């Protein structure tokens, strides 16, 4: 079950690990992705921090972590093939983190809430 | 907000999965299948661009005595009927009011094609510079389709009673398509084999449908911007403006200083005094691209600004043009392109970015 923030990042929880990506809506707005800057491994980040960066043929955008924690995996394949996210945004992760405050999950939107949020834009 | 203008093909385009953008007062498609895909269609096959937002003026009068020959940098008097030429409408300081293409329709008739964003000021300025002649703005009634790509000739052949093989670059014919008038021009903004078709609104819709059935893929302004930048073609508002002269924009090969026209004296003076800045092409060393208004640094000194920037799908790096102060600049050394967030390394290169 994915959860979303208002910056169009999704996360999926498995145990204490959160997997993070960007939503299909965000990717459609950006168009063809051309470049990713990924977070550094083992850094402590707080919910809402800009931790990564993406460029497309049309625009550049920060990627904000939807939850606090320590970065424990990054998807290095995106450095050479950012278009993987265009092909399947909902199942291509950008980074994973070990959550430090799972209470924050309550402040994120579920699928339906996110869908309503996008429809309101 | 003012209502956006729509081209005759707007309804057709909305039936496709298109993303639109407000561009110079027009509601225009920025992409259909995706910018990189459309770039590929144009470079490898054939793409169809709706550029009906461009302005078309029609001039009638004596070329030598009406003032039109001194109104722009283009020597129309030396232009044969059936040929067209690229040049500039300049202000007295040599700055560019617009870049345009003039078509010699007959001894005393011209079509002048201008940028949508500059149509109003171009019309006023040209009118101020001519006497005993008429200038009509037919931009709204004219639609324009650009058919661009290596297969463009092949798919257009069956619609025209014209020998397309004999139509040279920057040549055109006034012919017919679907029984309606069509000005067919062997020009484009992509660097590929290609044609620009000037037709009425109803004919543009018939052509659009027919060419798509023939396999042409619709392409938008996003791909068009990358295609033109890969060739190093200027975009008005980015690389050219009223405060940038054609000499600074590295377009001196389009400038003849041996004949008189508005802005020529300023350009001649400018050339004699030497240029303090010049537009140069750069390539980044990664997939990152700088955008318009990024600042340019060398050895931590600010030396200019980016006027155009994009990702080149062919080169797999960022490309662009930057206006750079020449004093103390070393073009053999790398430069840095900065905005608030990023610093991107780049090197000066030569145009075009890709060889055609």
Image (spheres, coloured by chain):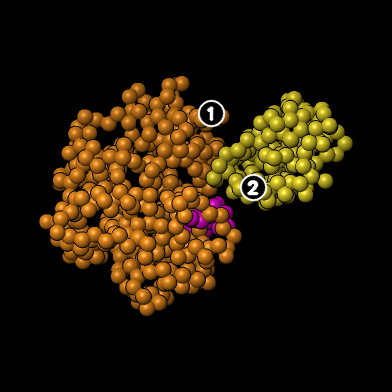
Residue at point 45%, 51% (across, down): B2
Look at mark 2 in the image and give the residue it sits on. Answer: A121
Residue at point 18%, 54% (across, down): B130
The chain letter of the orange chain reads B
Q: Residue furthest front?
A: B1
Q: Report if residue B219 is visible in the image.
A: yes
The chain letter of the yellow chain reads A
Residue B308 position by quadrant: top left
Look at mark 1 in the image and give the residue it sits on. Answer: B340
Percent of width and height locating residue A20 = 75, 39
Residue toward you, B32 or B280: B32
Residue B274 position by quadrant: top left
> Residue B317 in magenta?
no
- Element carrying mark 2: loop
Residue toward you, A33 or B60: B60
Q: Which residues are magenta?
A: B27-44
Above or below for B156 versus B129: below
Above or below for B315 versus B19: above
């Amino acid at each position: 079950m994915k959860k979303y923030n208002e910056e169009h990042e999704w996360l999926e929880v498995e145990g204490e690990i959160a997997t993070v990506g960007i939503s299909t809506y965000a990717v459609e707005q950006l168009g063809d992705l051309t470049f990713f800057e990924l977070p550094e491994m083992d850094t402590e980040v707080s919910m809402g921090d800009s931790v990564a960066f993406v460029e497309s043929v049309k625009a550049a955008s920060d990627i904000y972590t939807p939850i606090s924690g320590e970065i424990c995996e990054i998807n290095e394949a995106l450095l050479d093939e950012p278009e993987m996210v265009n092909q399947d945004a909902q199942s291509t992760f950008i980074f994973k983190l070990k959550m430090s405050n799972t209470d924050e999950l309550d402040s994120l939107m579920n699928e339906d809430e996110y869908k309503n949020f996008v429809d309101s834009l | 907000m003012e209502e956006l203008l729509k081209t005759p093909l707007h309804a057709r385009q909305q039936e496709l999965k298109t993303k639109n953008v407000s561009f110079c007062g027009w509601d225009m498609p920025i992409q259909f299948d995706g910018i990189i895909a459309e770039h590929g269609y144009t470079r490898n096959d054939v793409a169809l661009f709706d550029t009906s937002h461009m302005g078309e003026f029609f001039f009638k009068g004596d070329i030598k005595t009406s003032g039109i020959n001194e109104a722009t940098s283009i020597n129309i008097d030396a232009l044969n009927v059936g040929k067209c030429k690229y040049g500039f409408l300049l202000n007295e300081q040599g700055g560019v009011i617009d870049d345009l293409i003039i078509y010699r329709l007959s001894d005393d008739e011209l079509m002048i094609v201008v940028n949508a964003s500059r149509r109003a000021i171009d019309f006023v300025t040209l009118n101020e510079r001519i006497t005993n002649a008429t200038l009509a703005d037919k931009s709204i009634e004219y639609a324009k389709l650009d058919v661009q790509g290596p297969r463009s000739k092949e798919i257009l052949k069956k619609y025209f009673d014209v020998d397309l093989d004999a139509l040279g670059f920057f040549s055109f014919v006034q012919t017919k398509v679907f029984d309606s008038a069509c000005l067919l021009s062997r020009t484009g903004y992509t660097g590929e084999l290609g044609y620009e078709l000037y037709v009425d609104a109803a004919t543009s819709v018939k052509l659009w449908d027919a060419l798509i059935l023939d396999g042409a893929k619709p392409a938008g302004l996003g791909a068009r911007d990358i295609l033109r930048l890969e060739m190093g073609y200027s975009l008005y508002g980015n690389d050219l403006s009223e405060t940038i002269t054609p000499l600074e924009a590295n377009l001196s090969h389009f400038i003849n200083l041996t004949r008189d026209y508005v802005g020529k004296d300023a350009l001649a003076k400018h050339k004699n005094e030497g240029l303090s800045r010049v537009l140069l092409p750069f390539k980044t060393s990664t997939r990152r691209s700088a955008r318009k208004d990024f600042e340019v640094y060398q050895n931590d000194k600010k030396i200019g600004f980016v006027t155009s920037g994009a990702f080149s799908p062919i080169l797999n790096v960022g490309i662009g043009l930057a206006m750079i102060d020449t004093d103390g600049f070393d073009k053999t050394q790398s430069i840095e392109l900065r905005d608030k967030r990023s610093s991107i390394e780049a090197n000066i290169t030569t145009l075009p970015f890709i060889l055609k």
